[in-house]
Amino acid sequence: MASLFRRFGKIFQWNKLSIWEIKKHSLESLYIDENGEANKRWIVKLYYNFIPFVLSVSLLSLGVFISDEVSNYLITGVSIFAGLFFNLLLIIADKLKIRRELLDSNKTEAKENYLKRFEIFSRQFISTISYAVIQAIWLIILMTLCKIEVFQESVMHNNFLCYLVLSLTYLFNFLTYLIVFKLIVLLFTILSSLYIMIFDDLNLNNGKHKF
C-alpha cells in the first residue's frame, strides 16, 4: 500500500511539495542519534509503529470514537502546536548560524567535531519538526472528516450508504488515533532534542566545552 502511494506521489510530484522527502528524512533521523550513531531499529519500530497501531486498534475495539466536541478542541490544540513548531524551525536555524559564527575563528579539531555534531542534530531536529507540522495538518483534516458520523442517522434507510459511512467513520478515527500517537512520539523526540540543545547552550556559554 505504501509503495502504491509512493508511485502515485511520483506521478503527481511537484518540486515545491517535498512531503515524501520530509517524511523520509524525519524517519531516518529516528534511527540515528545526535552523534550520527545508529539506534536499534526494532526499538524505533516498537515505539513509533507497533505501540501506536495497537493503541489505535484497542480504542476502536472498545468503541471509543472522536466526538464532534472533542474534535473541535483537538483541532484548536493541534493548530496551536503547528504554529509553535514553525517558530522552533526559525529558532534552530538561527542557533546554527550563531554557532558557526562563534566557532569559525581559530578552528580546531574539537570545534569542528562539535559543529559537525550540532549540524547533524540540527538536520534531525528540522526534519522531525517539519514532519510533525505535516502530521498536524493531516490530523486537522482527519478530525474534520471524523464528523462524517453525524450523517449516519440520515442514511439509515439506505444500507449501502449506512455501511459506507460506518466504514469511513472507523477508518478516519483509526487514522486519527494512529497519527495522534505517532505525533506524541515525535513530540517526545523533539522535547528530548530541545533539552539537549538548551543544555549544550548552557555549557557553551559557561565555557564548559573544551576546545
Image (spheres, rainbow, N blue to C red):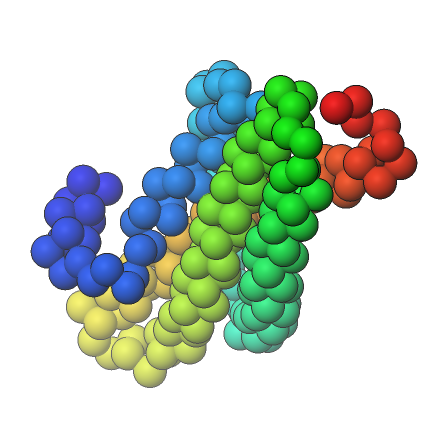
- Is residue 19 left or right of 185 when viewed as pictured? left
The residue at the point 62 percent across, 43 percent down is 100
The residue at the point 10 percent across, 56 percent down is 11
- Is residue 149 left or right of 124 when viewed as pictured? left
- Is residue 162 left or right of 151 when viewed as pictured? left
Q: Which quadrant holds residue 156?
A: bottom left
The residue at the point 65 percent across, 46 percent down is 101
Where is residue 151? Give x, y as percent.
Answer: 36, 78
- 52 or 97: which is nearer to us? 97
Where is residue 19? Give x, y as percent.
Answer: 33, 55
Residue that protrudes farthest toward the bottom in the picture: 154
- 53 or 88: which is nearer to us? 88
Q: Which quadrant holds residue 185?
A: top right
- Is residue 127 left or right of 192 when viewed as pictured? left
Q: Quadrant of the C terminus?
A: top right
Q: Is residue 88 visible?
A: no
Q: Is residue 137 visible?
A: yes
With respect to residue 122, does 88 lie above or below?
below
Q: Quadrant of the N terminus?
A: top left
With respect to residue 136, does 101 lie above or below?
above
Where is residue 88? Give x, y as percent.
Answer: 63, 57
